[in-house]
């Protein structure tokens, strides 16, 4: 069975969790977490590298030991070291870490003092009042844990878009190779580029439905077959991702694609418009009485209710139908529109490649410029730059620009926004940068008023250019901090500075609703990779998907400008 990068990353995360619960060396724990993050964001399958005999230690953060484990997992599907850890500590205990407020130290106490190693045991201990007796917990913490366990149980398992892609895209290719398959299209929330995906819907037209169904349920990664009929089958993959495949006739393919792509709210509104015209829309077509009058293409479905085709990313009933009716649908930004990337790191801080390697990787993806924006000194864990080291790197960039062809490096810094709104580096060195990317990396739990004021003060700084990952959220890990985003966006407009849409699959921050807000306020958004390795530039596609969900056009995105038009925009922020 193929082993995906996400599979290896999952095992490494479990190793890190178990090591952390057992109070292992934090550097060792961090090595596994960094390797997991590297694998999740890497465009090249590690399994392909193993098959070709390539050196895995060339990957960022992968030494001999981790490389050997990756090879073992690819070749056997297992990791002996993880199996050893599981024998020492129940593997179910890592589920406890998903409960807000339970870090490794508390999980360790619950396990050793109360023998709690499942969510059910945790809930029972909380209901019985046993948790409050432990040092460092108390009645309030116990009640919070009980509420969090209940909320967690109700939460549907969802996959980050980039992780879902690792399973969906190979399955699509597998189905396309079946003799008789004509069209194979990924629909649902995946096609709409939702940040997370609950399941995968695949529509197929074919001359041999039976063969498609048989080959689908026989796919190597299928764990359970929930249903199998002549035109529809549902399976659970070994990754726990549910996949539904439907075979549809060519005459109704467009209707089915529209039906299985649009959000529920969008589709309800489309059906309402059809009813006004005495029509009926279903997955089988558009009908006037018993006669099908449209449905072979999505365009024909929308045309039947008086609308132009609506891009999948907009189908949320957030104003797209009104815009379509008024002829005001946006021409959404495309990946090919990006001319550069305005947020990247090298091994000078917590990145994994050199200036030249990052420049060449960006150029290979068709980019014309790349901003190097290392962390500033306050982020000690990332070995952030002080003024002396920043100036040294700026000199290196100037020298390298004299040697590079077809790409230009810009001198920047990702400077920490301190709690009082000050920036982490002095004005004299910031004034020498081409751009300054400000970021909140601490004090996420400030009140809405304090967090907003903190960011506004930072944006008022004369050398502030772009606000990085503006809400600070990490999908499934950290909620956005509480901030008045409208005030932030309007201050950006007043100052002539910009907001970032961070394309890393764990962030996808700016949220789509804030992209729309920025667009409405004439504030440009920079779609940036936040690349820490050469492979991370591949994540720009997810940033573009998020931008499209936020109604952004080419003109709304800062880094669609060629360098000669970008530089004046960057300079205007220096007041």
Image: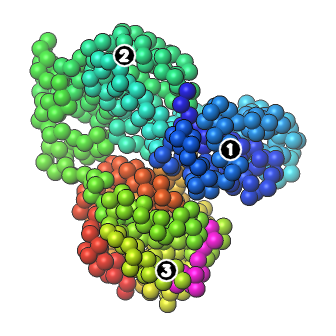
Report x, y in % for residue 478.
58, 53
The answer to whether residue 326 of the structure is visible from this angle is yes
Q: Foreground residue, 253 or 132?
A: 253
Within the magenta stretch, is there residue 383? yes
Q: Residues within 10 Å of mark 1 (few under 14, many from 20)?
A: some
Instruction: Give the overall secondary structure of the magenta segment.
Output: helix
Say if 205 sits above or below 122 in the image: above
Label whose residue precedes the other's in the sequence (3 or 2): 2
The CA distance from mark 1 to mark 2 is: 38 Å
Specify start and end residues of the magenta stretch as a single range. 382-391
Rendered residue at 81%/33% (across/down): 87
Residue holding disc 2: 212
Q: Nearer the viewer, mark 3 or mark 2?
A: 3
Query: Residue drawn 76% across and 39% down?
Result: 81
Is residue 494 rendered magenta in the image? Answer: no
Q: Could you say where residue 75 lies in the image, as x and y percent from the top left?
A: 62, 33
Closer to the chain start, of discs 1 and 2, is: 1
Q: Residues within 10 Å of mark 2 (few under 14, many from 20)?
A: many
Q: Quadrant of residue 173?
A: top left
Task: Report the disc number at residue 468.
Answer: none
User: Tag count in the figure?
Assistant: 3
Could you tell whether 466 is left or right of 272 in the image?
A: right
Of residues 76 and 418, the one nearer the viewer is 76
CA–CA distance in space, label 3 to label 2: 56 Å
Relative to the observer, which residue lies in front, 21 or 433? Answer: 433
Residue furthest to the front in view is 53
Instruction: In the rendered structure, find residue 68 and report the number of the disc placed on it.
Output: 1
The answer to whether residue 503 is visible is no
Q: Which residue is mark 3?
A: 396
């Amino acid at each position: 069975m193929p082993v995906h990068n996400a599979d290896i990353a999952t095992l490494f995360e479990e190793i890190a969790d178990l090591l952390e619960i057992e109070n292992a060396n934090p550097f060792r724990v961090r090595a596994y977490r960094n390797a997991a993050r590297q694998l999740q964001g890497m465009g090249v399958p590690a399994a392909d590298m193993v098959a070709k005999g390539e050196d895995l230690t060339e990957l960022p953060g992968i030494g001999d030991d981790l490389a050997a484990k990756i090879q073992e997992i690819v070749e056997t599907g297992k990791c002996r070291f993880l199996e050893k850890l599981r024998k020492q500590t129940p593997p179910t205990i890592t589920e406890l870490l998903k409960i807000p407020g339970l870090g490794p130290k508390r999980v360790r106490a619950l396990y050793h003092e109360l023998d709690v190693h499942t969510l059910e045991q945790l809930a029972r201990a909380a209901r019985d009042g046993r948790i409050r007796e432990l040092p460092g917990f108390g009645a309030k913490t116990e009640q919070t844990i009980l509420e969090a366990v209940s909320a967690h149980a109700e939460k549907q398992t969802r996959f980050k878009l980039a992780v879902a892609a690792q399973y969906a895209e190979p399955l699509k290719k597998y189905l396309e190779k079946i003799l008789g398959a004509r069209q194979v299209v990924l629909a649902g929330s995946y096609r709409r580029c939702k940040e997370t995906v609950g399941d995968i819907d695949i529509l197929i037209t074919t001359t041999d439905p039976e063969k498609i169904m048989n080959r689908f349920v026989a796919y190597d990664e299928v764990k359970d077959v929930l249903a199998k009929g002549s035109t529809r089958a549902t399976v659970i993959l070994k990754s726990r991702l549910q996949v539904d495949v439907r075979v549809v006739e060519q005459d109704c393919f467009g209707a089915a694609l529209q039906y299985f792509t649009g959000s529920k709210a969008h589709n309800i509104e489309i059906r309402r418009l059809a009813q006004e015209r005495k029509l009926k829309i279903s997955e089988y077509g558009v009908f006037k009485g018993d006669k099908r009058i449209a449905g072979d293409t999505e365009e024909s479905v929308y045309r039947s209710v008086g609308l132009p085709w609506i891009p999948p990313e907009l189908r949320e009933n957030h104003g797209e139908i009104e815009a379509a009716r008024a002829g005001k649908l946006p021409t959404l930004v495309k990946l090919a529109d990006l001319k550069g990337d305005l947020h990247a790191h090298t091994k000078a801080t917590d990145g994994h490649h050199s200036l030249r390697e990052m420049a060449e990787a960006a150029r290979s993806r068709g980019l014309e410029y790349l901003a190097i924006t290392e962390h500033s000194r306050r982020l000690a864990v990332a070995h952030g730059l002080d003024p002396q080291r920043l100036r040294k790197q700026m000199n290196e960039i100037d020298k390298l620009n004299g040697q590079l062809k077809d790409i230009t490096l810009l001198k920047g810094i990702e400077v920490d926004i301190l709690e009082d709104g000050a920036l982490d580096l002095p004005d004299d060195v910031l004034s020498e940068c081409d751009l300054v990317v400000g970021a909140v990396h601490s004090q996420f739990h400030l009140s809405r008023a304090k967090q907003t004021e903190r960011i506004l003060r930072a944006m008022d700084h004369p050398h502030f250019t772009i606000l990085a990952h503006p809400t600070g959220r990490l999908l499934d890990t950290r909620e956005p901090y509480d901030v008045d985003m409208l005030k932030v966006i309007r201050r950006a407009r007043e100052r002539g500075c910009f907001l970032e849409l961070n394309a890393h699959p764990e962030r996808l921050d700016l949220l789509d609703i804030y992209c729309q807000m920025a667009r409405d306020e004439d504030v440009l958004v920079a779609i940036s990779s936040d690349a820490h390795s050469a492979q991370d530039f591949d994540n720009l596609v997810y940033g573009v998907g998020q931008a499209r969900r936020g109604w952004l056009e080419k003109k709304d995105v800062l880094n669609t400008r060629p360098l000669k038009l970008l530089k004046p925009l960057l300079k205007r922020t220096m007041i």
